[in-house]
Amino acid sequence: MAHRKKKLLIIYHSQGGTMERLARRFALGANHEEDVETLLKPAAEATLNDLLQCHGIAIGSPEYFGTMAGLVKDFFDRTYEAAREQTIGLPFVLFVCAGNDGRGALTQIERIAAGYKWRQALEHQRIVGEPSKDDLNRIEELGHTMAAGVGMGIF
């Protein structure tokens, strides 16, 4: 019997390019795990099927006016009813970038994840201002750790 890779879905929204850079860095870390297939998609392109077929999800959102990006919210709006009963216990992690805080976006997404009954796998990351080299390394490490946990089934 062929070994089926577990899937890690990474969704994000990026208007100015910062969150895309962070999401790509997260995926770079996740790709260190050969037994896990990573799927990196802008939130607007992520589908219900992507969500239903993943074994873990990472969500990257900038904070706009104290809230998550509208297209990240749109992903939840499009998938919630059909996915909430089928994704109970799904491990998730968040990474947020913000000009001055980021807590509003984290709180909103955590509230929605609680509605899906997902499980927080790792400590969420909040980056304020322009990401430093340390921030980028931390996000890459987060991706690697998330993928390793999904691959081993520990989350």
Image (tube, rainbow, N blue to C red):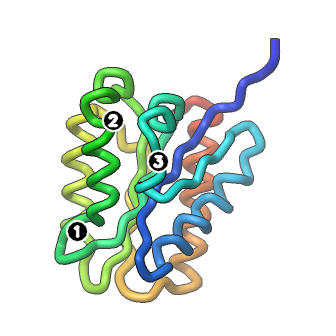
Instruction: Please tell me whether mark 3 sits on a helix, a strand or a loop.
Output: loop
Seen from the viewer's position, the closer of residues 79 and 92 is 79
**Residue at far top of view:** 1
Look at label 3 and name its amino acid. Answer: Ala
Look at label 1 and name its amino acid. Answer: Arg
Measure the C-alpha gap from mark 2 to mark 1: 19 Å
Q: Is residue 110 left or right of residue 32?
A: left
Look at label 2 and name its amino acid. Answer: Trp
Can you give x and y, in whole percent of width and height, for residue 141 in the image?
60, 62
Residue 108 vertical position relative to residue 65 in the rendered view, above or below: above
Residue 62 vertical position relative to residue 73 in the rendered view, above or below: below
Q: Earlier in the sequence, mark 2 or mark 3?
A: 3
Measure the C-alpha gap from mark 3 to mark 1: 24 Å
Is disc 2 in contact with disc 3, using a CB cutoff of under 8 Å?
A: no
Residue at (39, 56) in percent of width and height: 94
The residue tagged 2 is 118
Residue 46 - label = 3
Measure the C-alpha gap from mark 2 to mark 3: 18 Å
Q: Earlier in the sequence, mark 3 or mark 1?
A: 3
The residue tagged 1 is 103
